[in-house]
Amino acid sequence: MGKELSDRGEQNYLDWKYEVFEPIHPILHGVPLSKEDFIRDENRALIALKDMASTSEPSVTLDLEDVAHSMIVRACFNSDRLGLPRTARRPKFDNWFDEHVIGVESDY
């Protein structure tokens, strides 16, 4: 979905998130944030799994819950940007995410 948005000339989740974090990264870390480094970090789990498949002794440590949250949020954002209909379960996920990940209760 992100590629489809890019192909349309529209902003996908990674572009949006980079735009938000790029200006504050030097303040927090003292160095600028390249888009390549940002995207590599955002895709670290996918890259690790691909690299694991090519090694003789595969081993990788990932926070699978964090990776799953990130990928679902990415998909939801991109889906909304594409104008795709929301599933019947989407409000339930949004409420759960707001409460358990962000830490706020929502009125959905």
Image: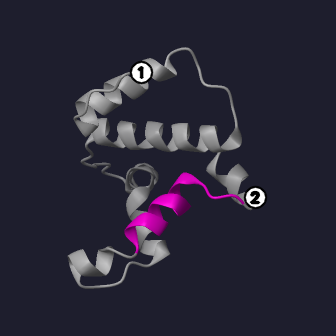
Residue under the image location 31 percent in, 75 percent down = 25
Residue under the image location 41 percent in, 58 percent down = 42
Query: As drawn, is 101 to the left or to the right of 76?
Result: left
Label 2: how many Cα within 10 Å (few below 14, some 14–19, many 20+): few
Secondary structure of the residue carrying tag 1 is: loop
Q: Give the range drawn in magenta.
A: 10-22
Residue under the image location 59 percent in, 44 percent down = 78
Residue under the image location 42 percent in, 68 percent down = 38
> What is the chief secondary structure element of the magenta stretch?
helix
User: Residue pushed farthest front?
Assistant: 107
Quick one: 36 or 78, which is closer to the camera?
A: 78
User: Residue pushed farthest bottom?
Assistant: 31
Dot 1 or dot 2: first in sequence order is 2
Where residue 1 appears, as percent x and y from the top left, is 65, 45
- Kindly indicate whether the residue at mark 2 contacts the one at mark 1 (C-beta within 8 angstroms): no
Q: Report the Cα–Cα distance between label 1 and label 2.
A: 33 Å
- Residue wearing tag 1: 108
User: How was this image coloured?
Assistant: one colour
Quick one: 22 or 63, which is closer to the camera?
A: 22
Is 38 drawn above or below residue 54 in the view shown? below
- Residue wearing tag 2: 7
- Going by the numbered disc 1, the residue's amino acid type is Tyr
Where residue 101 appears, as percent x and y from the top left, is 26, 36
Where residue 108 appears, as percent x and y from the top left, is 42, 21
Secondary structure of the residue carrying tag 2 is: helix
